[in-house]
Amino acid sequence: MRFREQILGGSAAMPGASLQRACRLLVAVCALHLGVTLVYYLAGRDLNRLSYLVGVPTPLQGGSNGEPGPRVAAPPPSLDATEPRAGGDASPHADSLPGPAINLTSAPVSPVTALSLPACPEESPLLVGPMLIEFNVPVDLTLLAKQNPEVKVGGRHTPKDCISPHKVAIVIPFRNRQEHLKYWLYYLHPILQRQQLDYGIYVINQAGDSTFNRAKLLNVGFREALKDYDYNCFVFSDVDLIPMDDRNTYRCFSQPRHISVAMDKFGFRLVFKGMSISRPSAVVGKCRMIRHSRDKKNEPNPQRFDRIAHTKETMLSDGLNSLTYKVLDIERNPLYTKITVDVGTPS
């Protein structure tokens, strides 16, 4: 009995004392946690790490429903202060001041630092191969934007799980083809995301009703896109051509690449044979064309073959180095950037 009392007497107070010490330790840890959080907040340092400290996602990480929030980046500087801007004159002195900041498409930046992301693989594991392409269902761009939440304003997208080496600007010469554009966006945005490209969509709209100058619009798109981002690859696409296989990658290779090599318009036969360019196989390179009648002021140029034959003689004086145009408007739509320009009359 005495032995039992000694045991009880020696240990009865222990649970209360241990609980008290545990509570004091917990309070100390909480105070330390709060202090560190407060220091980071007041110092204004890496606020992305603040979310991990307090357990609350920042807008860059997304909300509790798992949907990504807006991503921001400092707009890149213009390549040339003399380039024409929206609403400005095309003369050398009309553009000495930078344009409004709202006209810049910021490149999406992941809240995770670049050092923590691996490089995207040479061939994306997300590709599905051949696809069924149809044009019999109307496309709602508002619904399409909701179906592509990773595409940011201006039609910009960058992979969230890896760093893509392919910074691709896709330039579309355009006039009066809104329904075709809807189908192009409907099919191409999912394809380009599966291809894990860092890309932007630029629709270069020719104002007025003069002869459609496709080649000049492509040059305009090249120059304007470089004001937004440091693209290292440019893909020039017609608005009515849709690839039928997502393995037909919209990126650059070691030499110029012909992407739409086998169109249904030509019975999927390989056209332009004998050219020294890169191209996918006739199977992977299949494309569907949206059927339409030829637009007025878009008739075939009777001089086109003669001009092509003399390209080596004229390329040093006719092209980007002699490009003149006037930007009339820039629209940053949810799925693409539309730049309306006055290209003048063809010479």
Image: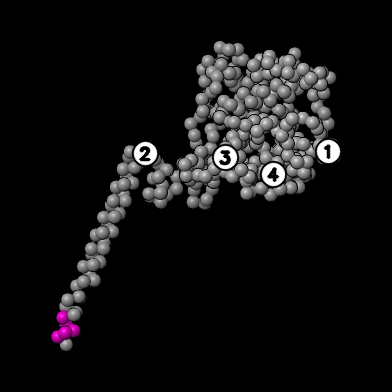
Which quarter of the figure has residue 20?
bottom left
Coordinates of residue 281 in the picture (x, y in percent): 75, 41
User: Who is closer to the viewer here, 202 or 210?
Assistant: 202
The residues bearing labels 2 and 4 have C-alpha atoms spaced at a distance of: 43 Å
Residue plotted at (79% across, 20% down): 309
Q: Is residue 176 visible?
A: yes
Mark sitting earlier along the chain (2/4): 2
Q: Amino acid at mark 4?
A: Arg
Up-down: is 60 above or below 25?
Answer: above
**Residue at which label 2 appears:** 45
Q: Secondary structure at mark 1?
A: loop
User: Who is closer to the viewer here, 153 or 158?
Assistant: 158
Marks counted in the figure total 4
Residue plotted at (40% across, 45% down): 49
Q: Is residue 58 left or right of residue 252?
A: left
Picture disc at residue 69: none
Picture disc at residue 164: 3
Magenta range is 2-6
**Residue at which label 4 appears:** 247
Q: Amino acid at mark 2?
A: Arg
**Residue at which label 1 appears:** 269
Q: Secondary structure at mark 3?
A: loop
Mark sitting earlier along the chain (1/2): 2
Q: Secondary structure at mark 2?
A: loop
The residues bearing labels 3 and 1 have C-alpha atoms spaced at a distance of: 32 Å
Coordinates of residue 286 in the picture (x, y in percent): 77, 41
The residues bearing labels 1 and 4 have C-alpha atoms spaced at a distance of: 19 Å
